[in-house]
Image: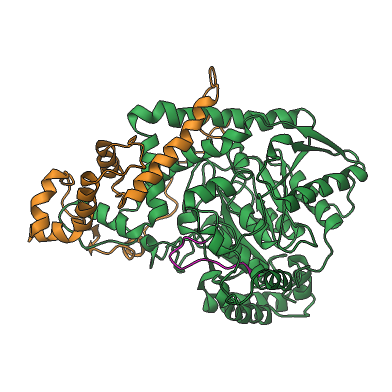
Amino acid sequence: MWARAVKLGLRSWVGWRRGFTSKADPQRSGRVTAEVIEHLERLALVDFGSQEAVARLEKAIAFADRLRAVDTDGVEPMESVLEDRCLYLRSDNVVEGNCAEELLQNAHRVVEEYFVAPPGNISLPKQDEQEPFSHI
Amino acid sequence: MLGRTLREVSTALKQGHITPTELCQKCLSLIKKTKFLNAYITVSEEVALKQAEESEKRYKKGHSLGDLDGIPVAVKDNFSTSSIETTCASNMLKGYVPPYNATVVQKLLDKGAVLMGKTNLDEFAMGSGSTDGVFGPVKNPWSYSKQYREKRKQKAHGENEDSNWLITGGSSGGSAAAVAAFTCFAALGSDTGGSTRNPAAHCGVVGFKPSYGLVSRHGLIPLVNSMDVPGILTRCVDDAAIVLGMLAGHDPKDSTTIQDPVKPFTLPTFADVNKLCIGIPKEYLAPELSSEVRSFWSKAANLFESEGAKVIEVSLPHTSYSIVCYHVLCTSEVASNMARFDGLEYGHRCDINVSTEAMYAATRREGFNDVVRGRILSGNFFLLKENYENYFIKAQKVRRLIANDFVNVFNSGVDVLLTPTTLSEAVPYLEFIKEDNRTRSAQDDIFTQAVNMAGENLTSAIPEPHAKEPEQLHVTSFSYLPMTNELAGIIETFVVTKRPYWT
């Protein structure tokens, strides 16, 4: 049952990934390697889904590379346009709240006053580990 | 009545020529008639009628709340509205009903505004066409104007009536279309890289982007924390000034709002430009600029010069890098901001129960479209340890250079900058979709995003009265000064007649 759930949810992900490694797209510069793709998908928990998406990322990187032409020696990075002001801090008093019921209404799985999550600390299966399940 | 300005309608309400309920009903029926524009995602009919009724009671007692009391307004669907679905045009938030009102929405409601509904946008405000939301694209009301229909008749024969409609621009396209189609008198948009000014330009309405920190972002579902601001769309500059007066000011719930006191202002009735110095940045004379926009730009500059203003050429040397810098910073912040959508506490959740990571991954794949996913992945790439210094920090340094460009220009005696908003007029949808979202955003945001990075405030003013499709100019002034509105108001008086010219 565990395997079936994985298959149902991740089959499309596995499918495109296997496709990716088996074909080489001549138009791509190869800048974004398979390791980087896997790493990004794991970090972002969002998948590329297709070759076009990888190509778009490469174009985005090429676009961003134009910044190299700017001379930024001695320039401090700017995080916010309001950097010369202090952020406003409210005083540490409770002025609102007590709306647990309202907030819980937006969640799909709730048990009493808890949000229900699947078990944590289980990493997404690596690409080669997924192979056996796709045949089920 | 629906074509009047906010101020005119407000006066009519105060004098009893029309009641808030009648006004609300007229707007609601116009919304139904213009449904094909797809400007609204949610029309809050019951809420609106109830608010109109309360407004009417106030007027009867002589206790009106001010200029906005009883005025129909619309709000972009990435502002949280209590008990009204807020989707950001995404599957991720379909069915999400916020438990609170965004501060700007609350301020409008406190002043008696009547909320007509939530308007359509690009998914999560990412895009420059309002074509990429899950509820479909927004059509520009101008596609149905006499001028455009005549122009199309000359061009193509045997073409399907409705196949070549124009885009509204984005991402606040729904808000712009709602205002342009007379279904409301003011609308809220959001502006990160031009998302209010771009559709304002394409739909022929006024789009105002306040300085960063002037208007509260609490309740605005964030895209880029350091550049987002709520934007105002209205049919004339005076109306934008009225709405801004209601919305500006410190909000204890948004720590990035400035604490300086904000004085509401009114536009001067008589325009004296003798002491004004207007800057024309030479780098904005891009080769891709269409000839119509270019000629309108010089016409406006000449007009000011002939009235006594000093018009000089200025330089913003890092202009060509600003769109690249914006692209890196935007995707990086987006990667961080979109991490909150995991399906646990709100929003879409898919049925996988194997592990939290698997559930998050599948939820996010189902909930986000390609554009959003693409930006998240690009952002994560730029934030990788090996890339952080070369891309993210570098972009932040370039941001400072760009912001300094503006500071230097304004310190050299220039009061305002006058530039085009977009490269050309609104394009037909079929042409727009030939390029992907990222390419289009890079092309269309070219004039508008530099000021988001520098935090300046500015307006897109109403355009060329004889143009076949709307073209607009951009007026930029130093942060927090009301100058932008005054100048835009001046442009409006000189260039446009009082009646909307597209009727």
Q: Chain B appears in which tint?
A: green
Q: Locate residue B375, reporting x and y percent.
A: 41, 46
Q: Name the residue: 36% across, 58% down.
A: A98
- Mark yes or no: residue B112 visible: no
**In terms of image quadrants, where is residue B27?**
bottom right
User: Which of these two is toward me, B446 or B361?
Assistant: B446
**In terms of image quadrants, where is residue B359?**
bottom left
Q: Name the residue: 62% across, 79% down.
A: B53
User: Which of these two is toward me, A114 or B356?
Assistant: B356
Q: Does B464 appear above or below A130?
A: below
Q: Does A67 appear above or below B240?
A: above
Total marks shown come to 0
Q: Name the residue: 52% across, 65% down.
A: B120
Residue stretch rendered in magenta on the structure? B131-141
Q: Residue furthest top?
A: A74
User: Which of these two is toward me, A129 or B6?
Assistant: A129
Q: Locate residue B330, reporting x and y percent.
A: 48, 42
Q: Chain A appears in which tint?
A: orange
User: Which of these two is toward me, B146 or B451?
Assistant: B146
Q: Quadrant of the C terminus of chain B?
A: bottom right
Q: Name the residue: 43% across, 54% down.
A: A96
Q: Is residue B381 left or right of residue A24?
A: right
Q: Locate residue A79, reporting x and y percent.
A: 50, 32
- Mark yes or no: residue B458 visible: yes
